[in-house]
Image: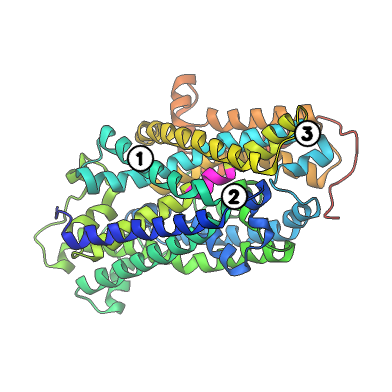
Amino acid sequence: MTEFSLADWMVVVGYLVILAMFGWFFSRKGVSSARDYFLGGNEMSLWLVTISVLATTQSAATFLGGPDYGYRGDYTYLSTFIGAFLAAVFVAKILVPRFYAIRATTVYELLAVKFGSRATKAAGAMYLVGRVFANGARLYMAAIAVSMILFADVAATSVITASLAIVLLGFVFTFVGGIRSVIWSDFVQFLIYTGAAIGVLIYLRMQIPLPFADILDALANTPSGQNKLTLIDFSFSFSQPFSIWAVGTGVFLLYVGNFGLDQDTTQRLLSCKDEKGGGKAIIFSVLIAIPLVWVFVSIGELLHIFYERPDIMARADTMNVASEFQGETITVFMFYILSEIPSGLRGLVTVGVLAAAISTLNSGLNSMSSVLVEDFYRPWIERRRKVAPSHFVNAGRIGMAAFALSLFLMSAICFYWQRYAQMPLLEFALSVMTFAYAGLLGVFFVAVFTNRGSANSVIAALIIGFFVILAQQAFMIDILGLPEVMNDIAFPWKLCVGVIVAAIVCSIGKTKQRRILHGQ
């Protein structure tokens, strides 16, 4: 493996200098209220919010997991954008108008209209738990890459140390400027990791001595009989996470949760000037993401030819990439980066990994803190005394520090969790997101489309939804002695089960207001 050169380190240092300059600029502007700190005063432009949403949803999981999926499988992950687009339209037409109608700072305030403040607090608490899970998993994946760069291994101590370094870097940047600094940072991070991915794709293509048509033929007719150009999987199997049936059900639900019920994403939509801007931002972000994710998956497809087709690459045998890192097959992209990419470009791609990680980390810290302050701390403190608007800005910063520590601890847990589950990076990242979404989706569907539910049934549904997902995890299946076949069920179907159970539990309650929530 080639060590980092001076040119590589200069690229990394340059990136850190750019981050520092952004942090300095937004610290000069200052913020005077929680709405300004968390929502940018509802003055953020449509195109900027669109890129920010895209940068938030396309995390280090995409940067590392996309090539990993292409290397192992085919293009079926791209079919998830069918579910993503349908979910974006649903959120834009159904949920976003309701959020703007009540001038929500957090999406969970919508539940207070029908069920009261207890339901809002319960949903906010579930979001915080789920976001610690999801962002902790994404942080862990970025730490794998940084660990390989700094320590040339993926041992526990190395990955955890790398995770701590990323947390500190992300926290320091977002501490002062609030959502404005996060959104502008997302724009810069997007340009960096998109440029890095395109650069790798071009360089990798140049290394393969075949015309484009022959490359397509090699991918369509692999020695194992696999067609790596498959885009839509029409087969029905509960073990396939990205079949068209899973995409239209569990993946659709996953993206509804991510776009409309996850403060991490929705906070950006609420920073637009009006509901039309917020709705357009989420739809545009999905459309722009399609070619971007294609680039990452295509890198994996070409890596398959590079490492697994010695007949094409004029080598005596296939290259055993996994053995270079203690049998870890999740690091094929980083192995290629550190072994094959020339000096300078290697630094740019490394910065791309950091950019993807920090973009997601920054947004998570700010959004989690907004829920903590607006849904929990503000109601509590205002019942006791009158405080200045700037008080809540400082409270938000303290909240971010607490969540930064939580994400670091969760990333350490994910190191062992992912290895026990033996799941590829992309599936692991998506599956961890389902813990919070199961209960939240069940509750919001009941709240928006029925006259059922109560504060107590909301709380019960959120808790039961979480534990239904927990019971379907590999380690719980082993602990509880459940049928081994449950380990073969893909995460979209597990989410469907969790949402259905949560919706049934929530529907047991009877709401006092007995009306469906509308956008007026």
Q: Quadrant of the C terminus?
A: bottom right
Q: Nearer the viewer, residue 92 or 328?
A: 92
Disc 3 from disc 1: Cα separation: 36 Å
Q: Position of residue 491 (x, y in %)?
A: 51, 42
In this picture, is 464 found above or below 87? Answer: above
Crowd around label 1: few <14 · some 14–19 · many ≥20 (10 Å): many
Q: Earlier in the sequence, mark 3 or mark 1?
A: 3
Circle 3 sits on which residue? 117
Residue 159, located in which quarter of the rendered image? Answer: top left
- Residue 420 relative to residue 286: left or right: left
Mark 3–mark 1 CB contact (< 8 Å):
no
Closer to the eye: label 2 or 3: 3
Q: Which residues are magenta?
A: 362-367
Disc 2 from disc 3: Cα separation: 23 Å
Q: Earlier in the sequence, mark 2 or mark 3?
A: 3
- Report whether residue 99 is seen: yes
Q: Nearer the viewer, residue 506 or 199?
A: 199
Residue 141, located in which quarter of the rendered image? Answer: top left
Amino acid under disc 1: Ser
Amino acid under disc 2: Asn
Circle 1 sits on which residue? 163
Amino acid under disc 3: Ser
**Element marked by disc 2:** helix
Mark 2–mark 3 CB contact (< 8 Å):
no
Crowd around label 2: few <14 · some 14–19 · many ≥20 (10 Å): many
In this picture, is 192 found above or below 72? Answer: below
- Residue 81 relative to residue 190: left or right: right
